[in-house]
Amino acid sequence: MASLDDGWADPARLYREGRKARMLLDAAREAAAEAVGCRADEVVFASSGTRAVHTGIAGALAGRRRVGRHLIVSAVEHSSVLHSADLHTSDGGTVTQVAVDRAGAVAPSAYAAALRPDSALACLQSANHEVGTVQPVAEVAEVCRAAGVPLLVDAAQSLGWGPVEGDWSLLTASAHKWGGPSGVGLLVVRKGVRFAAQGPAGERESGRVPGFENIPAIVAAVACLRAVRAEAARETVRLRELTARIRTRVPERVPDVEVVGDPERRLPGIVTFSCLYVDGETLLHELDREGFSVSSGSSCTSSTLTPSHVLKAMGVLSEGNVRVSLPPGTAEADVARFLEVLPGAVAGIRQKLGAPVPETAVRTEEVDEIVVDSLGKRCPIPVIELARVFGDVPVGGTVRVLSDDEAARLDIPAWCEMRGQEYVGEEPAERGTAYVVRRLS
């Protein structure tokens, strides 16, 4: 409230109102630095977390251009990082994407293997925004430091819970992720990191981010960060108990569900699962009618009709995907009601789509191979049609699913993993792709 009254003036001016604005801005910078664990003169404020990412990556790459133009990112980074990587590639640079395991985590050894003499920058999120898996930032930072390569950490998801450990070089964050106002991003550049700001230079924010600082929003963002940090220890324990309850009880109450993300190394308030034979968009609408606002990485909820790049990189089921985010203060009663509502919502959608019932999945008439034509049909129909006919082939027989849905490339292998059957692979077809599955039992 004080910043609304006294933070309207230009903090670069020497008159009284300008000095008041400067004091508010400096105090916010000091508080942000304390929360991050860095020096105040290493912190600059941007107009969003995405802008901070783009500015940080572009500036670090430009500052180390003499070393080389090789950029390293993980396959599950936020889209803002991947968009910067695409721009870097189109400008003649090279990018290596480090793969993740089925829980969504990178291996420090994989970053070590990706480092080259011409590596200019490596990027790694502190925790994944879709599945909550916490990354081994400290170990990767040590590997990069030994090679003389700076590491940029996207800490948007985790900064509200605590500082990022490790000897990282650059850090970005977004205020709305910890409950602050939108339109405030954080960029930290450690002393000693070569950095050359790109675009027209300005006099503000160390010349790295042009434009007039939004002081009321910045002050509110930092005040909110301090407030959530003060309660983080207590809320971490409480929210972990609630998300653990969801991770345990959803598979018990809803058949054919895959809970994704690391069960231990994860953020307190995020839990993600995918429901076989379910249209993700329909499920989100059903839950919304019941008063639950959740997200999804399913292809049927996106305009591109492709599954989330995070779920794809992890190799997990994408259809019927639900991401539940529990903000601080979430009531236990809300979680209990969600667990009551979800089974009926999933069962209703499966019934409408004609998903197979386990008791009737096995049939008596058998042939050595069945071809399922799912061309033109979208997630989750190709997998439903595979399951319907799978009992018609004998052990050792195959089902060949023809599909032009990009999600099938992810969901059919995931179905095989859940059912204990063999995914033979994909083959080119006259139209779309043929996905071949062999019955093992």
Image (cartoon, helix red, strand yellow):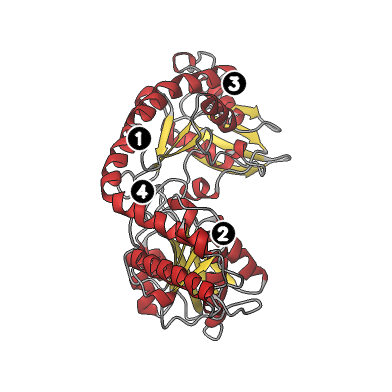
Give residue 267's mark: 4
Give residue 80's mark: 2
Q: Is residue 238 visible?
A: yes
Front position in the image: 143 or 201 = 201
- As measured in the structure, the alpha-carbon distance from the residue carrying label 4 to the one carrying label 3 is 34 Å
Category of crowding for the residue at label 3, using alpha-carbon neighbours closer than 10 angstroms: few (below 14), some (14–19), many (at least 20): some
- Residue type at tag 3: Leu
Quarter of the view holding residue 302: top right
- As measured in the structure, the alpha-carbon distance from the residue carrying label 1 to the one carrying label 3 is 25 Å
Would you say the residues marked 1 and 3 are in contact, meaning their CB atoms lie under 8 Å apart? no
Where residue 393 appears, as percent x and y from the top left, is 52, 23
Would you name the residue on which mark 3 appears? 353
Q: Of callouts 3 and 2, which one flags the residue occurring earlier in the amino acid sequence?
A: 2
Would you name the residue on which mark 1 appears? 247
- Residue type at tag 2: Ser
> Taking 278 as reference, is 428 above or below it?
below
